[in-house]
């Protein structure tokens, strides 16, 4: 799990760096298409981060919740996540 957490932190640091770069591009009046390309890259990076977070949750937290008898809470939580993802 520590490895996963370190990898997730590295992903977030990279995303943060990209966002700072985009901010600088806007401040410097960089060509709009170039800025948009960077925002699309950040969106994809966030999607990859979300996928890894979800994978970790499904492989650790969810089974633990079911073992502890929190079945309904786990189902509601996952249903809520699914609904948020579809908005």
Image: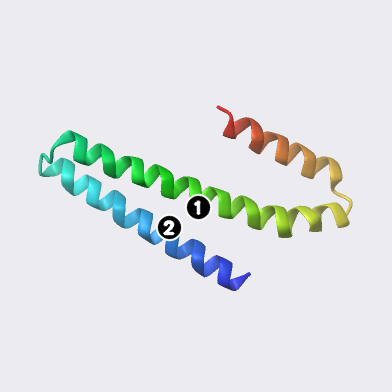
Query: Is the residue under label 2 in contact with that under label 1 (CB below 8 Å)?
Result: yes
Q: Is residue 2 above or below residue 12?
A: below
Q: Is residue 75 found left or right of 8 in the rendered image? A: right
Q: Identify the residue shown where x is 26% and y is 37%.
A: 36
Of badges 1 and 2, nearer the viewer stands: 1
- How many residues crowd around disc 2 within 10 Å: few (fewer than 14), some, or many (20 or more)? some
Q: Residue furthest bottom?
A: 2
Q: Secondary structure at mark 1?
A: helix
Q: Identify the residue shown where x is 51% and y is 69%.
A: 6
Report, in whole angstroms, how far the alpha carbon at label 1 lies from the one at label 2: 8 Å
Q: Is residue 85 found left or right of 22 in the rendered image? A: right
Quick one: quadrant of the C terminus?
top right
Kindly identify which residue carries mark 2: 12
Q: Position of residue 28 (x, y in %)?
A: 10, 44
Of residues 66 and 59, the one nearer the viewer is 59
Q: Is residue 56 above or below residue 70?
A: below
Q: Position of residue 65 (x, y in %)?
A: 80, 53
Q: Identify the residue shown where x is 58% and y is 54%.
A: 53
Q: Secondary structure at mark 2?
A: helix
Question: Which label belongs to residue 59?
Answer: none
Q: Position of residue 70 (x, y in %)?
A: 85, 48
Q: Identify the residue shown where x is 76% and y is 37%.
A: 76
- The part of the image, by quadrant, that contains residue 75 is top right
Q: Is residue 73 above or below residue 15?
A: above
Task: State which tag comes first along the sequence, 1 or 2.
Answer: 2
Kindly identify which residue carries mark 1: 49
Q: How is the image coloured?
A: rainbow
């Amino acid at each position: 799990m520590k490895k996963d957490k370190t990898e997730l932190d590295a992903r977030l640091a990279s995303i943060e760096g990209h966002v700072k770069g985009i901010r600088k591009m806007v401040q410097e009046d960089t060509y709009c298409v170039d800025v948009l390309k960077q925002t699309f890259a950040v969106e994809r990076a966030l999607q990859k981060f979300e996928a890894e977070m979800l994978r970790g949750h499904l492989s650790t937290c969810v089974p633990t919740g079911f073992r502890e008898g929190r079945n309904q809470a786990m189902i509601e939580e996952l249903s809520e996540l699914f609904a948020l993802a579809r908005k």
